[in-house]
Image (tube, rainbow, N blue to C red):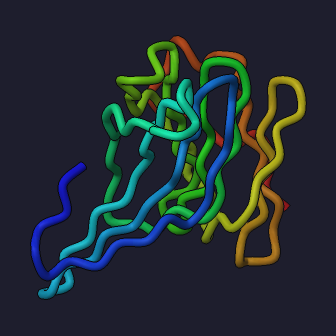
Amino acid sequence: MPKPYGYQSSIIGVAVKDNWAFAIFNIVGAVGAEINGVLPVNLTDPYSPTLTGWVAFVPYLPFEIKVEGDYAYVADTAGGLEIIDLTDPSRPSRVAYCDTAGIASGLAIIGERVYMATNTGGLAVCDIRFLANKMYLPIVMYK
């Protein structure tokens, strides 16, 4: 992904699966424009990693990433949970999200549920059993 002149970028987190690294990134422009998302990096040749594409989501800042099966799960602060399809790791795509009603700052995946810590002191739980059929996944529990 090219970085225009005058922009600052940072890698916030990374998850690795097989020969792929999936980094969550943040790019901020000189006038405050912001882009966030996931960068897949092919590690087949560890001495020459290759950036193959990217998927963006805005305007929130990603906080943590986990990869499970063919999906990446991103705690996206006020954006809740972003779910990225990695079936073709070189061409990731955003397939679903789950609103946490607070700032998602951490996550764990157990079976068919994603558990997210939020700044409101709550625990949000998203059921991912129906991931293939829905763009928006509702919270099944929030305490």
Left or right: residue 34 versus residue 138 is left
Residue 100 at x, y = what percent? Answer: 62, 57
Q: In terms of depth relative to the viewer, which is nearer, 49 or 120?
A: 49
The image shows residue 56, relative to residue 17, as above or below, that is below
Q: In terms of depth relative to the viewer, which is nearer, 131 or 28?
A: 28
Residue 60 at x, y = what percent? Answer: 41, 66
Residue 1 at x, y = what percent? Answer: 24, 49
The image shows residue 71, relative to residue 104, as above or below, that is above
**Can you tell which quarter of the image residue 101 is in?**
bottom right
Q: Residue at x 81, y 68 (%)?
A: 122
Q: Residue furthest right?
A: 110
The image shows residue 102, relative to residue 124, as above or below, that is below
Left or right: residue 117 versus residue 1 is right
Q: In terms of depth relative to the viewer, which is nearer, 73 or 21?
A: 21
Q: In terms of depth relative to the viewer, which is nearer, 98 or 52?
A: 52
The image shows residue 58, relative to residue 137, as above or below, that is below
Quadrant housing the C terminus: bottom right
Q: Residue at x 26, y 71 (%)?
A: 34
Q: Residue at x 72, y 18 (%)?
A: 129
Left or right: residue 140 versus residue 74 is right
